[in-house]
Image: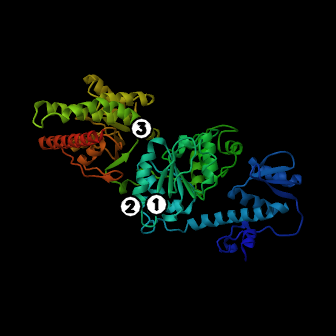
């Protein structure tokens, strides 16, 4: 059988269809007998159109509400699930396929059949999978192996695990397992750097780290050849016509709830992109069932009209035509799971596999312009320090000013990105303790996160105000409490599910004490502690002092209260950082003409 014959018959990759295993509704329509009308393909609307006798069109409209059009005509979206249903209808009411569309119908029906068989085969696949040796540099937990198995069995699906269960790792494990490269990662702006780091850490191509290209700007250009490309959602509209032509085999939409609203250029660009990819993976810890418009929009990107068109979806699944509220969210969820469109696990379901406390260091962006501006007076002090004798009495005071100034510059420059990260946690239903050191940084958090009505324990409150903040958080009045690193002693905030360090301290014990505000007696959750670090400034050296490695779960820091030895160790680390900063300043000064 030559290539043309395979296309005509729908046979691909030299593999014959096992017709004996086909569900009855996907069998061939018998030839001969009465023909009730015609079936043709509308290329503009991307739908199959039945035109025929009233008995067949009236039956189609009764069985498939979304097919309703003008009298004597019924339309069906060219979705592989719906095509199977059209074939089922044709078993009762045979139709003549338009000559120019016969080969297309054969291929389309073949896709529907393969999808049905793949769904059947998915039930027989190993419950847990691991990536091929040499393709993935990491270890998956058992529930993550199950997630990988799900993604491999369902090429267009939403992984909706709760925050902190490793959706990023599971998606990268899937790309490692399939080798479907080049791939595009579409992510929120504040997570570009983290995806870049995680991809380099976990994914391997021919035993080496992958080539990664981050797409920037709204104006398209020819990027360097790469295995993985990364773009953030705000740029999709500028690259709308270019991305579908770049030959991506797979696309990953992180925080896919970003696409819950249709009618935008961002949504349109994502839809065109997904249509051209073999594999579409959505990641979101916030699957939205109760708002029909939103879950329909998200799933529609994964598999066009797999829930029917909007009108029929709202009529049948929601409280009426155009209504956004799903009548039975549990039933919809079960349908999506049964169809292999969604997998969701909660922390409670996998709690036995999780340690009581998990530390994750994550890179985020910062504003370089703001950092440089704030560092100008710091650099002037650094110049003064270079002229002082190492034993001068003024030196220690000046070193402290330089350290404080650089830490504040680092904290302020990354504060909006920290706030964006925390916003995502809160929108995912987490209860967050956000720690910082400088009041100027906490003031930015207050402005950026004001909509969440945060509580504050910053050292500026009265005793009564501090108690009120604790009460607001513990009673559920707010899901966010912003706390000064040095004001955490004695607090009992075990209602928290996440701890976020927007700024770092030189002392491991200070962080450990802050973590323990959430990880207290009575806490039954697995606490996730995020350390958010910027690429420039003091964060890098502070990471080293704390024994933290980027993009790794770590448990290296001591848990006792800060003692004299710990304080001295932190002081030595801070001073060593200043010395390195000074050495760099001197070297750069020598390069000046």
The spot of residue 15 in percent (x, y) is 65, 74
- 432 or 406, nearer to the observer: 406
- 590 or 582, nearer to the observer: 590
| Residue 190 appears left or right of 359 | right
State the quadrant of the C terminus: top left
On the image, numbered disc 3 is attached to which residue? Answer: 417
Q: Which mark is on residue 438? A: none
State the quadrant of the N terminus: bottom right
Q: Which circle's residue, 1 or 3, is located before the other in the chain?
A: 1
The spot of residue 289 in percent (x, y) is 56, 44
Q: Is residue 88 above or below residue 495?
A: below
Is the Cβ of the residue at disc 3 closer than 8 Å to that at disc 2? no
Q: Is residue 23 visible?
A: yes
On the image, numbered disc 1 is attached to which residue? Answer: 173
Q: Is residue 95 visible?
A: no
Residue lying at 64% horizontally and 47% vertically, measured from the top left: 241
Residue lying at 37% horizontally and 38% vertically, measured from the top left: 432
Is disc 3 surrounded by few (<14), some (14 to 19) or many (20+) residues within 10 Å?
Answer: many
Is disc 2 surrounded by few (<14), some (14 to 19) or many (20+) residues within 10 Å?
Answer: few
Q: Is residue 100 above or below residue 291?
A: below
Is label 1 in a helix, a strand or a loop? helix
Is label 2 in a helix, a strand or a loop? loop
Inter-mark Cα distance, 1 to 2? 9 Å
Inter-mark Cα distance, 3 to 2? 27 Å
């Amino acid at each position: 059988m030559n290539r043309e014959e395979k296309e005509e018959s729908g046979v691909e990759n030299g593999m014959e269809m096992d017709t004996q295993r086909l569900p009855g509704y996907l069998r061939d329509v018998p030839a001969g007998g009465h023909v009730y009308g015609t079936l043709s393909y509308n290329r503009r609307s991307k739908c199959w159109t039945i035109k025929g006798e009233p008995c067949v069109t009236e039956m189609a409209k009764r069985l498939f509400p979304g097919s309703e059009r003008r009298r004597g005509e019924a339309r069906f979206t060219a979705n592989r699930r719906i095509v199977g249903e059209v074939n089922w209808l044709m078993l009762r009411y045979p139709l003549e396929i338009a000559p120019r569309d016969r080969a297309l119908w054969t291929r389309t029906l073949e896709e529907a059949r393969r999808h049905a068989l793949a769904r059947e085969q998915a039930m027989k696949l190993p419950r847990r999978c691991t990536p091929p040796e040499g393709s993935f540099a990491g270890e998956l937990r058992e529930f993550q192996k199950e997630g990988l198995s799900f993604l491999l069995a369902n090429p267009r699906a939403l992984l909706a695990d709760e925050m902190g269960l490793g959706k990023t790792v599971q998606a990268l494990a899937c790309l490692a397992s399939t080798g479907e490269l080049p791939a595009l990662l579409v992510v929120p702006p504040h997570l570009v750097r983290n995806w870049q780091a995680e991809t380099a850490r976990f994914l391997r191509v021919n035993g080496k780290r992958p080539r990664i290209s981050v797409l920037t700007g709204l104006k398209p250009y020819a990027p360097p050849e790469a295995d993985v490309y990364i773009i953030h959602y705000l740029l999709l509209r500028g690259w709308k016509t270019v991305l579908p032509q770049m030959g991506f085999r797979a696309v990953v939409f992180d925080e896919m709830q970003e696409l819950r609203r249709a009618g935008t250029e961002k949504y349109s660009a994502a839809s065109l992109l997904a249509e051209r990819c073999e594999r579409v993976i959505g990641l979101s810890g916030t699957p939205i069932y109760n708002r029909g418009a939103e879950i329909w929009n998200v799933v529609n990107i994964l598999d066009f009209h797999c829930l029917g068109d909007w009108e029929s979806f709202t009529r049948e699944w929601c409280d009426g035509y155009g209504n956004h509220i799903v009548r039975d969210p549990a039933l919809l969820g079960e349908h999506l799971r049964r169809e292999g469109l969604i997998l969701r696990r909660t922390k409670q379901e996998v709690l036995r596999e999780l340690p009581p406390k998990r530390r994750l260091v994550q890179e985020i962006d910062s504003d370089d312009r703001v950092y440089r501006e704030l560092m100008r007076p710091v650099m002037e002090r650094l110049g003064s320090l270079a002229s002082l004798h190492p034993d001068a009495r003024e030196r220690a005071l000046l070193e402290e000013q330089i350290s404080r100034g650089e830490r504040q510059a680092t904290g302020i420059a990354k504060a909006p990105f920290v706030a964006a990260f925390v916003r995502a946690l809160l929108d995912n239903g987490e209860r967050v303790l956000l720690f910082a050191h400088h009041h100027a940084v906490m003031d930015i958090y207050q402005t950026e996160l004001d909509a969440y009505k945060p509580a504050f324990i910053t050292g500026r409150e009265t005793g009564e105000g501090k108690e009120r903040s604790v009460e607001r958080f513990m009673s559920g009045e707010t899901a966010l409490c912003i706390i000064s690193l040095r004001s955490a002693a004695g607090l009992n905030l075990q209602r928290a599910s996440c701890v976020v360090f927007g700024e770092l301290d030189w002392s491991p014990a200070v962080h450990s004490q802050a973590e323990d505000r959430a990880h207290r007696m009575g806490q039954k959750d697995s606490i996730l502690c995020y350390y958010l670090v910027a690429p420039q400034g003091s964060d890098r050296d502070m990471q080293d002092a704390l024994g933290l490695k980027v993009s790794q779960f770590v448990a290296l820091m001591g848990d006792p209260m800060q003692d004299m030895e710990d304080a001295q160790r932190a002081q030595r680390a801070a001073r060593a950082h200043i010395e390195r900063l000074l050495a760099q300043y001197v070297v750069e000064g020598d390069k000046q003409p």
